[in-house]
Image (cartoon, rainbow, N blue to C red):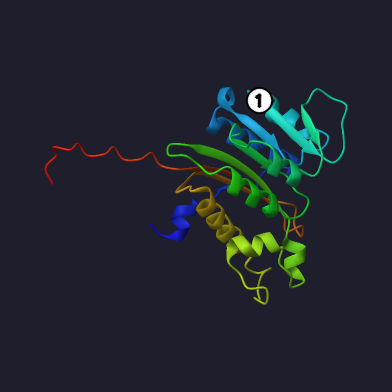
Amino acid sequence: MTFRQKLGKPRKTDSFPAAANAKIEIRRNVLAAIGAKRASVFDGFAGAGRMYDGAWREAASYVGCDLIWYRDERLTFVADNRRVLRAIDLRPFNIFDLDAYGSPWEQAIIIAARRPLEPGDSVGLVLTEGSGLKLKFGGYPLALRMLAGVRPSAAGGASGHDELIDRAIRGLMARMKADTIEARWQAMGRKGSAMRYLGLVLARKKKAPAASAGAKG
């Protein structure tokens, strides 16, 4: 199986009328794939709650995080999400939403280190990838570069944005012990924004049953 086949073919959603609608649709797809009745969401950039209203309110469990406190029904941490992700037990969560304004990969690396998949386990991951402007000017977000295995001096980051994302996903999978992508959805932001919206369901295959002691080879 090739690297591209392992990453899964994105299901194009570019026809959505607006970015917010695309983002909500991707989240609803991830929620359906995991199963709303068993979904436990950690929303790392919870904001005013548009994604919660559009999708996550239907999940069995939800915890948000934001630097700003909003007076509403949601259970949220008001803190730097990186500190929260390092401090709490991530094992109960099976969906992580990283709707960052810029790069979500620093938070994704923390999740990968602290929420590895067990055999037969699956996790939904929703990413807003906005590194395009930095790449255009020749820079790389550190976490993206680490996951993608790119040298700091490497050229062509902007033109290879989608390839970088694929390589970063591969790096995340290795750290999380995931061996397959069960589903992938992707949408583009408005023309010129270089934003990518992704929804992934990562899984680890079940262990093969051990051969019985008396089995003949």
* Residue at screen point 68% across, 35% down: 42
- SS class of the residue under badge 1? strand
Q: Does residue 83 lie above or below 59 as drawn?
A: below
Residue 105, quarter of the rendered image: bottom right
Q: Label 1 belongs to which residue?
A: 61
Check the image and name the residue furthest to the left. 216
The amino acid sitting under disc 1 is Ser
Residue 160, quarter of the rendered image: bottom right
Q: Does residue 43 lie above or below 184 as drawn?
A: above
Crowding near the residue tagged with mark 1, few <14, some 14–19, many ≥20 C-alpha atoms within 10 Å: some
Q: Nearer the viewer, residue 182 or 67?
A: 67
Question: Is residue 21 rendered to the left or right of residue 66?
Answer: left
Question: Is residue 38 rendered to the left or right of residue 1?
Answer: right
**Residue 18 visible (yes or no):** no
Question: Is residue 97 rendered to the left or right of residue 45?
Answer: left
Please provide percent x and percent y for residue 7.
Answer: 49, 53
